[in-house]
Image: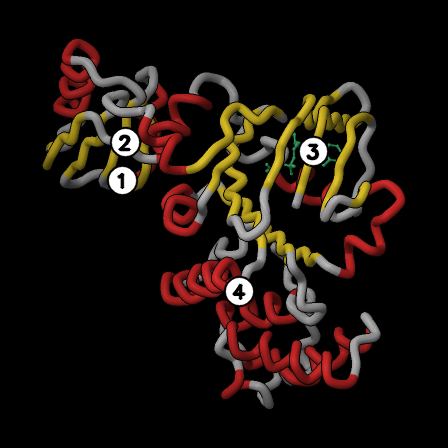
Amino acid sequence: MIRIRNLVKQYGAHIVLNHIDLSLDKGVILGLLGPNGAGKTTLVSILNGLIDFQEGEIEIFGLPLNGELEAIRKRSSFIPQSLALYDNLTIMENLQFFAGIQKISGAALRHNIDYALTVNRLHSLREQKAATLSGGQKRRLNIAIGLLNNPELLYFDEPTAGIDPESRNAILKTVRSFRDDGKTVVYTSHYMPEIEKICDEVAIIDHGRIIRQGSLETMLQGEEGHSAVIELFQASKAQLDELASKHEGVAAIDAGTLMTTWCNARQMGTLLAALEGEDIAVKQIRYGTTTLESLFLRLTSGENSDA
Ligand code: ADP
């Protein structure tokens, strides 16, 4: 479905994508995971012909991106993070407007609008103006607009950033349903539990390189025993970030959780002493935890992230 060989993208002397090789088969959800600034949006933008590149070959649907962009675009869709919809139009009017731009009409128009409304659970709201929708409903409309050409291949750029958990779950469910409908999905996120939940394959990207790619299952299997999760009683995220910055291979996941990229008594002793010094009580320590989060931290730890 997608074949990328030796892709290089640079802005001046700054190499943003550094000799990327990536392939993706039909019917798979690929999670593109990486810290802020890793190159995810750049990669997805290149695959959609939105920005150019210096070196490499890209084939999508067996067609070369250079030369066959229009044919590729007809069969794929990029759903950007920013909302592209008209507030003063209803959901239905928005869909008709964007279908018109793409010259979709007749039976295809009716079928594709019905599919877009159904998978995004927007049928009952279709006569409502976009301005009156919640943040999550607007995101769902944004996705619906991306479905108007009935794409075989969909790209999502952090579609759940900044929305409530209920809408987030609705969107994740929708993305999973695309796979059941035989579609292929590229899903960028830095939010690992989400990738773990919905993706079949993961490519970890850091500093413009793909440092690991494969099925989620295989990737996690090789990682046993490399990490620990420390659950805490009372702390703030800022306090834990500060503490983590002073200890190698430690990251604050949220206000009540630290994760390590190591699993040994000596380092654990030092960390526990530091927690005690800050008056932060430990609820539980789980050793040998195998999560995408721990693998990711281990692979990208150090000075890699500019987040
Ligand atoms: P991600 O999506 O993983 O957060 P991006 O693809 O947005 O990362 O950015 C990757 C790198 O490319 C960053 O260092 C960013 O500053 C740089 N970059 C992105 N767009 C431009 C641009 N138009 N000009 C110069 N540098 C850019």
- Above/below status of 72 relative to 305: below
- Looking at mark 4, is its residue's CB closer than 8 Å to ligand 1? no
Mark in the foreground, 3 or 2: 3
Q: CA distance from mark 3 to mark 2?
A: 29 Å
**Mark 1 surroundings within 10 Å by alpha-carbon count, few (fewer than 14), some (14 through 19), many (20 or more):** some
Observer-side mark, 3 or 4, equals 4
Q: Earlier in the sequence, mark 3 or mark 4?
A: 3
The residue type indicated by label 2 comes to Thr
Disc on res. 4: 3
Q: Earlier in the sequence, mark 3 or mark 1?
A: 3
- Viewer-nearest of labels 4 and 1? 4
In contact (CB < 8 Å): disc 3 and disc 4 = no
Mark 4 element type: loop
Q: Are marks 3 and 2 in contact (CB under 8 Å)?
A: no
The residue at which mark 4 appears reads as 181
Asked if residue 84 lies left or right of residue 64, the reply is: left
Q: Marks 4/1: CA distance?
A: 42 Å
Q: Give, as a three-letter code, the residue at label 4.
A: Asp
